[in-house]
C-alpha cells in the first residue's frame, strides 16, 4: 500500500476487467470475422446505452457501488476520535489505538486508502460526518456522474444487415491462402 502510486484512484489489483470482457465476447470470438465484427459492436452498443440509462437513475453524485462503500466506511468511522490541528488537518485516533493524519484539502490520509482509491477512508469519513459534510463531495472526480457519462458518451452506431450495405467496386475480402 505504501508504494502504490496514488494517481490512478483505483483499488483493482487484478485484471478481472479484461477477463470479464473476454468472457462476454466468448460467443462471438470463434465466429467468422464478419459475424464476429457484427456481434462485438452490438454488445458494446448495448452495454454503453445501458450504462447511460443506469447513470440517469443515480440518486447522488456517485454510483451505488461507491455509495455502498461510503456507507460502510461511515459505519466504521463511529469508533474514531478526532483531534483538529487546523487548516482542515486532523489527527484521528482509531479504537485499535493507532493514530492517522488526515488532510481534507489534499484528500489524503496516512492510511493511504483515500489517496489510492479516491474514496474517503473511515478516518476521513469520521471528520466529514462530524461537520455534517457530504461524503460524496470528497470523492475523487473519477467517481462522479459527469466522469461516468463522459466515459460512456461515445456511441456505437446501429448497423444494418449485410444486404443493405453500400456496394463498392473493390474486390471482396477473401480468406488468406492456406499454407501447410
Ligand atoms: Zn485513513
Image (cartoon, grey):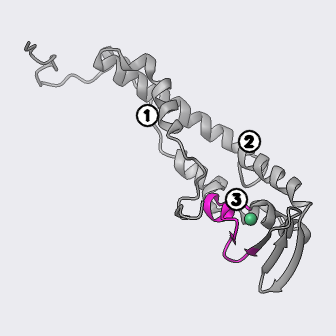
Inter-mark Cα distance, 3 to 1: 35 Å
State yes or no: residue 172 in magenta: no
Q: Measured from the top left, where is residue 64 in percent x and y?
A: 74, 44
What residue sits right under mark 1 in the picture?
157
**Labels 3 and 1 touching (C-beta < 8 A):** no
Is residue 10 toward the left or the right of residue 161 in the image? right
- In depth, the one of 56 and 118 nearer the eye is 118
Q: Earlier in the sequence, mark 3 or mark 1?
A: 3
Disc 3 target residue: 119
Kindly indicate the quadrant of the structure image that contains residue 141. Answer: bottom right
Q: Nearer the viewer, mark 3 or mark 1?
A: 3
Residue 100: x percent and y percent? 77, 71
Q: Who is closer to the viewer here, 2 or 116?
A: 2
The residue depicted at 54 percent of the width and 61 percent of the height is: 4
Pointer 1: residues within 10 angstroms few (<14), some, or many (20+)? few
Residues in magenta, as a range: 101-120
Relative to 12, say whether 117 is above or below: below
Q: Is residue 118 magenta-colored?
A: yes
Where is mark 2, residue-wise?
57
Residue at the image point whose x is 85% and y is 65% from the top: 94
Amino acid at each position: 500500500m505504501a508504494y502504490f502510486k496514488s494517481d490512478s484512484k483505483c483499488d483493482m489489483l487484478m485484471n478481472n476487467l479484461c477477463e470479464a470482457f473476454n468472457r462476454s465476447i466468448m460467443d462471438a470470438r470463434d465466429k467468422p470475422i464478419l459475424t464476429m465484427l457484427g456481434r462485438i459492436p452490438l454488445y458494446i452498443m448495448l452495454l454503453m446505452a445501458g450504462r447511460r440509462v443506469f447513470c440517469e437513475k443515480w440518486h447522488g453524485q456517485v454510483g451505488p457501488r461507491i455509495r455502498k462503500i461510503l456507507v460502510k466506511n461511515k459505519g466504521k468511522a463511529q469508533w474514531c476520535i478526532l483531534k483538529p490541528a487546523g487548516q482542515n488537518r486532523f489527527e484521528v485516533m482509531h479504537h485499535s489505538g493507532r493514530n492517522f493524519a488526515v488532510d481534507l484539502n489534499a484528500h489524503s490520509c496516512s492510511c493511504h486508502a483515500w489517496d489510492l482509491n479516491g474514496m474517503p477512508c473511515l478516518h476521513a469519513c469520521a471528520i466529514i460526518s462530524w461537520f455534517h459534510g457530504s461524503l460524496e463531495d470528497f470523492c475523487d472526480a473519477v467517481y462522479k456522474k459527469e466522469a461516468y457519462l463522459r466515459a460512456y458518451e461515445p456511441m456505437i452506431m446501429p448497423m444494418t444487415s449485410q444486404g443493405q450495405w453500400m456496394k463498392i467496386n473493390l474486390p471482396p475480402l477473401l480468406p488468406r491462402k492456406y499454407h501447410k
